[in-house]
Amino acid sequence: MIIDEIRNKEDSARVQKAVQQPQQGQWTNWDTAIQRSLTWNDIWHMAPLRISFLIRSVYDLLPSNANLLQWGKKDDPTCPLCQGRQTTEHALSSCKVALP
């Protein structure tokens, strides 16, 4: 009983800390997540670089212009094709110029 209480307290603190971080805390909000049927067998047979790309895209850790600006690596977050804000979502599925 004490172990469960400590575990719940630690889990609560971990979630609270994650929510306070803008990029890392996004996993707590699944409102914009696209539903996809992916089995462990599918994951097991993927190439390691593809798995890395999928994980980094889900957690918005790819080097989009918006992220590079936030990380202090770039001065401008705009998309070079459409002049909109280039986020990971924009680069992968929303740019009207890149995706006709």
Image (spheres, rainbow, N blue to C red):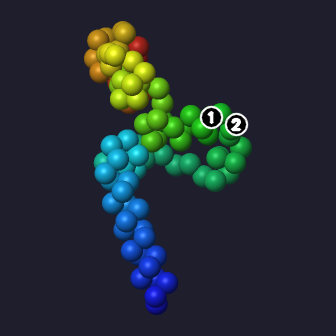
Q: Residues within 10 Å of mark 2 (few under 14, many from 20)?
A: few
Figure check: 7 above or below 14: below
Q: Residues within 10 Å of mark 1 (few under 14, many from 20)?
A: few
Q: Please give left or right for residue 3 compared with residue 66 in the image.
A: right
Indicate the amino acid at tag 1.
Arg
Looking at this view, is 49 or 66 the one in front?
66
Residue 64 picture location, percent across and down = 42, 24
Number of dots carrying numbers: 2
Q: Quadrant of residue 8?
A: bottom left
Q: Residue at x 33, y 43 (%)?
A: 22
Figure check: 55 above or below 90: below
Question: In the rendered image, which residue does mark 2 sit on?
Answer: 47
Question: In the rendered image, which residue does mark 1 sit on?
Answer: 50
- The circle drawn on residue 66 is none
> Which quarter of the rendered picture does the C terminus lie within?
top left
Q: Quadrant of residue 53?
A: top right
Instruction: Check if mark 2's residue and mark 1's residue have beta carbons within 8 Å.
Output: yes
Q: Residue furthest front?
A: 72
Residue 65 picture location, percent across and down = 39, 21
Q: Residue furthest left?
A: 84
Q: Tag 1, which secondary structure?
A: helix
Q: Residue at x 46, y 41 (%)?
A: 58
